[in-house]
Amino acid sequence: MAEGNNVREYSGVWVFVEQSNGQAARVSLELLGKGRELADKLDVALTAFLIGGAIGDLGKELICYGADKVLAADDPAFNEYHTGVYTRIIADQVTKEKPEILIIGATPIGRDLAPRLAFRLDTGCAADCTALDVDVEKRLFLATRPAFGGNVMATIICPDYRPQMATVRPGVMSPCERDGSRTGEPVNLDVEPYRNSAKVEVCETIYEETEGVDIQEAERIVGVGIGVGDRETLDQIKELAQLLDAEVGASRRAVEAGWLLHDCQIGQTGKTVRPEVYIACGISGAVQHTAGMCGSKLVIAINSDPMADIFSVADYGCVGNLADIVPALIAEIERSK
Amino acid sequence: MNCIVCIKQVPDVSEVSWDPVTGSLIRKGIPSIINPSDKTAIEAALRIREQCGGRVVVLSMGPSQVDEALREATAMGADEAIQLTSKQFAGSDTRATSYTLGLAVKKIGQYDLIICGKEALDGMTAQVGPQLAEFLNIPQLTYAVRIDVREDRVRVNQKLGDVRRVLETRLPALITVERELNEPRMAPMDAIIEAYGKEIEVWGPHDLDGDHTRFGLKGSPTKLRKMYSPKLVKSRLEMLQGNREELARRVVQILKTRRFL
């Protein structure tokens, strides 16, 4: 057994806050909500760790969303995310302040940053978690993540090393209600040692004009399976998606049958999606498909076969023909507007 | 231009089935494949070699059958394959894995680029690439959808969610690749047959110059506390009942409650 660090010296819960242009990423507020709960259970402070350029009043906002303290590295040089610079800023403060728990959003940036940071701090990090808790008695952080296509949940612990780290999928935790009466003063860190230290140059940053949102970023998806049957039903499903402000995705079989393009294929050989809501229309639910969408927050499945596998990953199921149910849904949505 | 590609052998998920009674994965008899984005990494290295010359070394840690993945990589065109296999490596978390791979990279010695897949189909942590880069103290350029090598520098188009960035750094560096980067070539049949006759170099703990207490399950900071089937915790499915109008009303009601409408 490799020797861990002295775990008893470590105390407090930290949340890394991702921001752009002074706006916190939603996942960071979600993590502050969860972090507040964990900090209360452990009876310790919750610290928000903020890095950015021109972050303005965001520090104070984070206190309203549950943080007791805010550590901010605020400098125009940190406007762009740099793995090396961000890692160094956080690692230096962690080494100094010794938090017992450090939580980071499992966004593209978080998934780039957290593993490198964990390795530098000589600790472990549980990736892409969907549930967090603490064992108060043993003072252990319990990080739970879906394993193997989401059919098994695994709870990961890091007993001998600190901080205990996890990245958490966006959309699975809830932010605290904003409380403007909470008080606290953000602390600005000395940024001088970190300026001009980037080894990677960011030559260009292109914010994609979202014309037909990338399905991986979509919050709402209507998925089309081979059960769609005919062009008319497909058109109705597209109309339904439009009414719901949703993107259209597809199973491999629906793509192979030519109903939709590969670009929107979801599953093992396509894209992995984690929308807020996924409406599966005529999708049988083979594991190749469900592995790509089982992170969806709410799944509603419509299928003519009551034994279809898709129902095992659904929250709500409707048994029936798409050609009947989809037009009824469209009518109902229009009526309710 | 010397590239080291780190690959993982994973179960072919398209062949996976589930035990209908226990809900658990049936692993028996499932064929193994090279993790898809790792295959993209191999292809990327081969194209860099075609353009700039140099060598491609493929590295993989895993049980003895990992040699199949390495043979396939050789058949695709890799110059050399190294297998890290030992009971002492078993049960490694991402930290122990990247530490072990890192020691092997140091033993290989001279390299300009390390290329890894973005994430593995089975674990899906996407952690080993960045951790290996940290161990080697080189920059990481993640989520690459385009790679351009010019002399001692590399430029990568990075897909950072809905932002696209162009990153540039001096070599050596580590790149993790998205599957959309390229279409990996098929290994020709004669090359596959030839690869099966080759001897694959196997390294164990004693071939690596490092701290052996950092290997495998014992050297992993993260531990599995428990595993459970989410279905046993809550059977979340509610079957909606009624004719099509009633079904539609219920669905709309659910969408409204959750503020989607």
Image (cartoon, rainbow, N blue to C red):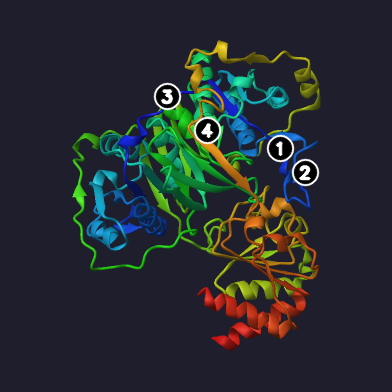
| Residue A52 coordinates in the image, percent (x, y) | 28, 49
Identified by mark 2, the residue type is Glu
Depth check: give the residue in front, B236 or B69: B236
Q: CA distance from mark 2 to mark 1?
A: 8 Å
- Residue B8 drawn above or below residue B194: below
The span from disc 3 to disc 4 (Cα, nearest Å) is 17 Å
Question: Residue under circle 3?
Answer: A3
| Mark 3 secondary-structure assignment | loop
CB under 8 Å between callouts 4 and 1? Answer: no
The residue that disc 1 covers is B11
Tell me: B188 left or right of B156.
right
Q: Which residue is mark 4?
A: B94
Disc 4 residue type? Thr
- Which residue was labeled with disc 2? B15
Spot occupied by residue A195 in the image (x, y as percentages of width and height): 23, 37
For the residues beneath circles 2 and 1, the answer to whether they share a chain is yes
Task: Report helix, strand or loop for mark 4.
Answer: helix
